Image (cartoon, rainbow, N blue to C red):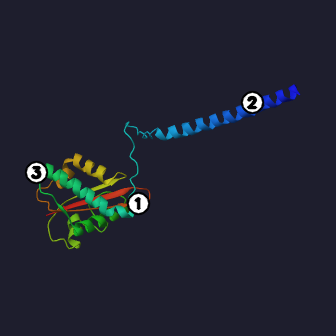
Amino acid sequence: MVTRNWLRLVGYFQIDGMIKMTRSIVALLVILIGLTGCLGNSPTLGPDGKPLPSVFRIGGKDKGKIQFRVLDSVNALRVASGLQPVELSAELNAAAATHSRDMSVQNRPWHFGSDGSSPIDRVARTGYTGQMLGENISETFESDVETLAAWMQEAATRDVILSPDAKFMGISWFQEANGKIWWTQIFGS
């Protein structure tokens, strides 16, 4: 009888120990999985040691947000430079949208349309009555903010943004399925 009770007691402790060990292993796994979420994704670096750009996806509801975010950013830069702010122009937005799509079709960033049109021609087609002052373009996977920052680093595109004669701005883009964005920004008096 003592032997039977002893075996039951030993068996109980073995099963209880296995349950406790299983609980400990599960708890440890949960903690490890939770900690992996705390590790940030380190960016993939290019051959130059700089992080490779990530794809900036634009949703259907983002159009107004992006246009006004760029407008606010441009106006902050202009006011900081002692210039008057600009307003969005529907006609310049339309000319920018047309050119962004056309650059994608041509698969090259340049200022002339596939029909040979110049920026001045495209702006005139929209019915804009002011003078077209300049156009900035970009082919990138970067956001509107990153694109504006890149334009501000180059003298020629910065001069367009900070033109003292500018009163109106148009900004638009076309995003391809692979995420590439064709940006066009136009200023007019």
Residue 183 rendering spot, x and y as whole percentages: 30, 58
Q: Which mark is residue 13?
A: 2
Label 1 sits on a secondary structure element that is: loop
First in residue order: circle 1 vs circle 2 = 2
To which quarter of the image does residue 43 belong? top left
Q: Quadrant of the C terminus?
A: bottom left
Q: Is residue 63 above or below residue 17?
A: below
Q: Residues within 10 Å of mark 2 (few under 14, many from 20)?
A: few
Does the image show residue 136? Answer: no
**How far separated are the C-alphas under marks 1 and 2?**
64 Å
Q: Nearer the viewer, residue 38 or 118?
A: 38
Q: Which residue is mark 1?
A: 176
> Residue at the spot x=40%, y=48% of the render?
54
First of labels 1, 3 by sequence position:
3
Q: Is residue 122 left or right of residue 163?
A: right
- Residue type for callout 2: Phe
Q: From the viewer's perspective, tell me whether residue 18 is left or right of residue 35.
A: right
Residue lying at the far front in this picture: please name it. Answer: 1
Residue depicted at 14% across the width and 62% down the height: 167
Residue on which disc 3 sits? 82
The three-letter amino acid code for the residue at tag 1 is Glu
